[in-house]
Amino acid sequence: MDNGLRYNSITKYYKKTFGCTVYKLALDIGATCPNRDGKLDYNGCIFCSGAGSGDYSTQAHNLDIAKSKLKNKQIGKYIAYFQSFSNTYMLVSRLDKYVKMVLQDKEVCGISISTRPDCISQDMLNYLIDLNKHTHLVIELGLQSAFDKTLKLIERGHTFKDFLDTFNMLKEQNIKVCVHIMDGLPQEGIAEMLETARVVSELKPHSVKIHCTYVPKDTKLAQMYYNGEYSPLTMQEYIEILAKQLEILGDEIYIERLTGDGDRTSLIVPEWSLHKRYFLNQLNKYLANKKGSID
């Protein structure tokens, strides 16, 4: 248990590692994606907003603004989180410029870099190996689903094998990996969602982020929703699936996130996903009442 949470929250790891509360600063370093710049496609994944999942990110040179966005901030340290798009999909020298910039801030104790499995070249891997020696580094690797049929449907542009190869490559170099998965993707049932959790659990990543699929405006998923081809999970459905996934993931893998932060100005459905605190309270109540809930 951690502050009443009935799962292995990353907060526990941060306090153990850094001796204080740690906040993540969502930053935009001007990255793009092979699914956006034409290498694979121009439209992105079917659920991808124009901000590349970085709707609330701040330009990296404005750390003070990023800090000010955090509500009820207490004394602590920060992880600089390069969030928007695929942040290893650039020249090493360019990424290094932003890394050095944020590490000049004495309150920044580490870096998380969000990216795709097909965006880490050998030169970039060599750079990450070296960076891992000098700061607390986590590579946040987008998987979403362990099923190739789903990855094709959501137009990810990579396979599960691509993910597995990159994950193992990073893990062999003792680089911490946070795996991103999504529940409620089109044409996936509970069996597929639980299997994705099982596959990820067997890989034993440092941490996992999970969130329910939501539908932003001006995306292919929005077209599917309006055509009656997609329906999002209800909050109760998602809670029940999460409870099973958390049990599968166990108490050795840290949980970084259990809900997304979609932009309320562009969100179509589900409306409940906007109420993050209420959702997390309902999840924790469900886990507390569930026989065999996670402590």
Image (cartoon, helix red, strand yellow):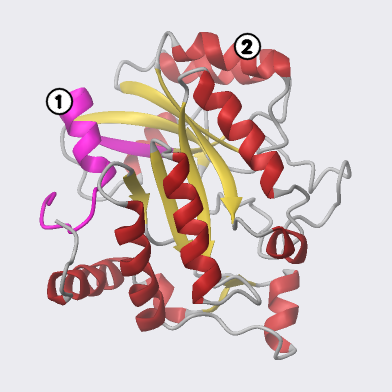
In the rendered structure, find residue 19 and report the number of the disc placed on it: 1
- Of the numbered discs 2 and 1, the one sitting upstream in the chain is 1
Q: Nearer the viewer, residue 255 or 198?
A: 198
Residue under the point 37% across and 59% down = 258
What is the span of residues highlighted in magenta in the rendered image? Answer: 1-25
The number of numbered discs placed on residues in the rendered structure image is: 2
Q: Can residue 237 be seen in this view?
A: yes
Q: Position of residue 111 (x, y in %)?
A: 44, 26
Q: Distance between the Cα atoms at labels 2 and 1?
A: 30 Å
Q: Nearer the viewer, residue 227 or 285?
A: 285
Q: Can residue 213 be seen in this view?
A: no
What kind of element bears circle 1?
A: loop
Horizontal placement of 199 versus 185: left or right? left
Circle nearer the viewer, 2 or 1: 2
Quarter of the image containing the C terminus? bottom left
Q: Where is residue 55 in the image (x, y as percent from the top left)?
A: 54, 54
Residue under the point 30% across and 72% down = 279
Q: Where is residue 139 in the image (x, y as percent from the top left)?
A: 51, 31
Q: Nearer the viewer, residue 144 or 244?
A: 244
Mark 2 sits on what residue? 126
Q: In which quarter of the image is residue 123?
A: top right
